[in-house]
Amino acid sequence: MNDYLTQFINELSSKTANMKIQCKDVPFEGAAEERFGFDRCYVAADFENGDRKRFLTLIRELYEERLKNKIDRAIMGIEHGIDLPFPLAVLSIESSSYNDMQDLLYTLFESVFSYISNNTLNVFLPIDTVENLEESVSAVHESITEDLYLKARIGVGMLSKSDIDLKLSFQTSRAALKLCSEFKKDVVFYHKEWLEMLILSIPERARTEFVRENFKNPDILSDNETLKTITTFLNCSLNLSKASRLLFIHRNTLSYRLDKIHSETGLDIRNFEDAMKMKLCLEILDLGQI
Amino acid sequence: MADVVFKNISKIYTGGVKAVDDFNLEIKDKEFIVLVGPSGCGKSTTLRMVAGLEEISSGELYIDGRLVNDVPPKDRDIAMVFQNYALYPHMNVYENMAFGLKLRKTPKDEIDRRVKEAAKILEIEGLLNRKPKALSGGQRQRVALGRAIVRNPKVFLMDEPLSNLDAKLRVQMRTELAKLHDRLQTTFIYVTHDQTEAMTMGDRIVVMKDGVIQQVASPQEIYNKPSNIFVAGFIGSPEMNFIDGHITVKNGKYFINFKDINLALPEGIAKTINPDFINKDIVIGIRPEDIHDEEMFLETFPEYTFNAKVEVVELLGSETYLYLQYDGIPLTARVDPRSVARSGDMVKIGFDMNKIHIFDKETTKRVMD
């Protein structure tokens, strides 16, 4: 239990002298597991069953409203030193319905907090590494489609390691959400799209010119096998053996294909500079504005 | 287990883009059907309409005899498997598989029974306590399949589920999926752009282009009797060779002509050709494996042979590809690895005229039975 929640429960108990509320990290007699913001704790309150449920819902809503205001102020930069379970990822989710989605998140993660703001679901997810974040968010998107049958777009901001980064995490998650429609992707991780964002900052005419000057015949990319050969070779850092293994073809066949790509496009991607040009051309063409 | 029937289904996006156009298909109960085509052909949109993730613009969709156009996705009794097979890193395999059922408030003992049953089918019982990080790509894919199996759906929808696996694993998983279909005895609708997957897995294949069905048939029929130039070129690797030409008849005998070449058509093949196309512009199709350079073929069928220049020889170990040129016509031949042809050589080659395909140049449709 975080200090803020402990303080909230103590404050509440002192104001409701005739109602006894007990809240602990560990199970105890008469207590039931409840979720308050990021925390799961064990709560006992001396009420009849129906009243107890209503009362706990009420105090949870009260606590979460306060937590939401605190986070909003931190995001706006007017509150500092907010105590949240860092490292924390901020996700901005856009969909047609959020109730089931919040349910899904609370079922999935031990600790998570979310609220709707401007028709977007803000999700604050404590997570330790960028790798786990990428995997978890991809899985969340899949679950939204597979289990809730909803279409959703998710923008994922930079991981915040402390309260100082929270504003940046939120802003980058919103920027990533905007990029979803630009890139025609359902999930955009801000930290992964640096090249695309750099390209987007270049005027469209200059981008078109760059492709025209450097890439002789973009039509060859309509052949899936050619495109796969190029991307695999680039992704393998121009390593012929590794790429041929991944493509499941002989090294000589790959060499032959690269010769063919060279003669068709004018770019010999075994050479670093040409590989770089190819990567930029592919990204520009992928953005689909040419 | 259920049949799926599409009646005049179309999908038109705002702005008038027609993604799927008058799609008619009856998928039988327990059938493994593969939708294949290049990107943008409408195959994923079709699948997403079955799932209820895309609204149907017009037409009727029936699952197990029930009209489902307006049935919410969760009530359609389907399960989807995607290419990403993302798993939750903080959950073990058991929890990853059980999660969907937990969300549906399925009783714990029922969840346990279904997860263990699916794990047994997928042969991953020993992995249930492992975290995704400790799994190989193939094992992760099986867990993703397990998530779908535990739902016990009437129809499995799979959208390029193998495309994130490396080539070797993909081959292995193709067989696994075919076996899984046999074991589950459920209707599978599988979307891929990979023609090899389509050919090896489907009971029937639906080839699509620009939102329109091009052909629905068994893999053998698609390969041996493609209904048009698109299907002929899309299925088969390396792709079929196409040559502009004509059919002529001399003394009751049929010939195909291109450039200065005249090749006699065997009587059995000539009979199957629509006579309206004699002397008309046609496209001759010949698969790379039906172009021969071995002595025995050339000696047996001298009337099917001519000389061509070898431009490139690609040795693949089990077979060799010859990239040839005849008077500006590029040809690809798949020949025996013992072939002695080298780049720059003029070699004698022969077309297996029993395997020839003829298409109308104007409509691109097949003009023979």
Image: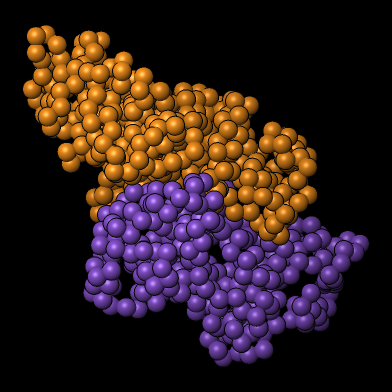
Chain colours: A purple, B orange
Residue positioned 14% across, 11% down in the render:
B253
Q: Nearer the viewer, residue A110 or A186?
A: A186
Name the quadrant of the N terminus of chain B.
top right
Q: How many marks?
A: 0
- Residue B44, given in percent of the width and then of the height, sits at 41, 44
Give the answer, above or below, for where B142 lies relative to B188.
Answer: below
Q: Quadrant of residue B142?
A: top right
Q: Is residue A154 something one can see in this rendering?
A: no
- Residue B20, given in percent of the width and then of the height, sits at 31, 41
Residue positioned 30% across, 53% down in the render:
A220
Residue positioned 9% across, 25% down in the render:
B280
- Residue A244, given in percent of the width and then of the height, sits at 50, 52
Q: Nearer the viewer, residue B239 or B316?
A: B316
Q: Residue furthest right?
A: A29
Left or right of A151, for residue B15: left
Q: Is residue B86 something one can see in this rendering?
A: yes
Residue positioned 65% across, 78% down in the render:
A67
- Residue A86, given in percent of the width and then of the height, sits at 68, 77
Left or right of B75, for residue A126: right
Left or right of A71, for residue A204: left
Name the quadrant of the C terminus of chain B.
top left
Left or right of A83, for residue A142: left
Q: Nearer the viewer, residue A31 or A84?
A: A84
Q: Nearer the viewer, residue B147 or A116?
A: B147
